[in-house]
Image (tube, rainbow, N blue to C red):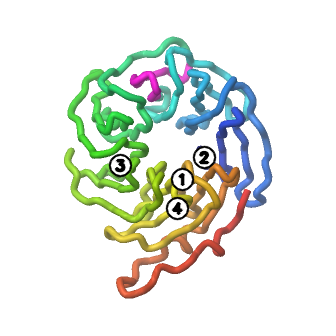
């Protein structure tokens, strides 16, 4: 699971380590050690702190320098997803079926949200104190975190593995391999293209009005106007994807991070309805 800041990529792995990579050189600059088990969620707080969640049931907050500053305890199972609510508040989702709000300054959880009946796999911060959470129970629940209340649910036909919000639509990546775009609390568009018996969409992120997704089918796919317009490959399951204005970064069970230039992945719009999908696997910028 990876995130970027100031030319760096932070990755967390099942080996229990966080690595800091230089995006330009591809070199590992630092390794953060502290979790007792694999890392399955990672995000950056607004103050630059690194926040990680683990199979060891804890959340760790790291200074930008790489030293562990706080350990947050309260979940009874793996911490599978994290979100940033404000400059000093984060939210976590766990296989214990709960969401918890925390202060970056440490201490017990500020609030616990209950409603899912199976593992919570993903969270997406919306607007106006709202958060969406996805679960293996096949539902997305939208919450008012200020009030601690469940607002409404969106039910799907498969487990929900990933979420991404663009201010208008919520993209839901499902275990079935489909991506469902929801608007105003209801499904509106379904994107189909990921393949394989195990094709769950493990990550989604919005980019330039399009969408980037990754899957256990070993691909990273780029979508525009309901169509898959690019396919990039790993050699094993792809677990996560992230992007900024210049690069797309994906992480895989093949133990690599792959970096592509945004302009190669999603160039300015053209009418490509009659064009075959090009192979951009050789245009990736770097493999770590």
Q: Are marks 1 and 2 in contact (CB under 8 Å)?
A: yes
Give the CA separation, mark 3 to mark 2: 19 Å
Task: Judge whether 114 appears above or below 282 on screen.
Answer: above
Main SS of the magenta part reads strand
Give the CA separation, mark 1 to mark 2: 7 Å
Q: Is residue 5 magenta?
A: no
Residue that label 1 marks: 242
Mark 3 falls on what kind of element? strand
Residue that label 3 marks: 172
Residue at x-position 59% and y-position 29%? 54
Residue that label 4 marks: 220
**Pointer 1 or 3: first along the chain:** 3
Instruction: Provide the residue span drawn in magenta.
Output: 92-105
Q: Provide residue 151's location: percent of width, then percent of height.
A: 21, 31
Q: Are marks 3 and 2 in contact (CB under 8 Å)?
A: no
Q: Provide residue 113's location: percent of width, then percent of height.
A: 34, 21
Image quadrant where residue 145 sits? top left
Q: Nearer the viewer, residue 194 or 86?
A: 194
Q: Is residue 95 magenta?
A: yes
């Amino acid at each position: 699971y990876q995130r970027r800041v100031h030319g760096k990529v932070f990755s967390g792995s099942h080996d229990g380590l966080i690595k800091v990579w230089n995006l330009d050189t591809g070199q590992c600059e630092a390794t953060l050690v502290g979790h007792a088990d694999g890392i399955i969620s990672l995000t950056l707080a607004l103050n630059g702190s690194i926040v990680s969640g683990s199979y060891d049931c804890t959340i760790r907050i790291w200074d930008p320098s790489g030293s562990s500053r706080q350990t947050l305890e309260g979940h009874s199972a793996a911490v599978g997803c994290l979100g940033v609510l404000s400059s000093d508040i984060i939210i976590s989702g766990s296989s214990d079926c709960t969401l918890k709000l925390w202060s970056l300054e440490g201490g017990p959880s500020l609030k616990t949200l209950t409603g899912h009946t199976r593992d919570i796999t993903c969270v997406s911060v919306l607007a106006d104190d709202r958060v969406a959470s996805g679960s293996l129970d096949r539902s997305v629940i939208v919450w008012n975190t200020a009030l601690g209340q469940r607002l409404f649910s969106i039910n799907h036909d498969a487990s929900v593995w990933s979420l991404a919000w663009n201010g208008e639509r919520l993209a839901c990546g499902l275990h079935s391999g489909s991506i469902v775009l929801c608007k105003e609390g209801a499904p509106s568009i379904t994107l189909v293209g990921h393949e394989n018996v195990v094709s769950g969409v493990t990550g989604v992120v919005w980019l330039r009005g399009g969408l980037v997704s990754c899957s256990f089918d070993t691909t990273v796919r780029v979508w525009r106007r309901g169509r898959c317009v690019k396919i990039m490959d790993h050699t094993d399951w792809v677990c996560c994807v992230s992007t900024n204005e210049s690069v797309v970064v994906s992480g895989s069970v093949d133990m690599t991070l792959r970096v592509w230039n945004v302009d190669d992945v999603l160039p300015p719009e053209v009418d490509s309805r009659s064009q075959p999908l090009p192979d951009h696997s050789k245009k990736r910028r770097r493999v770590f």
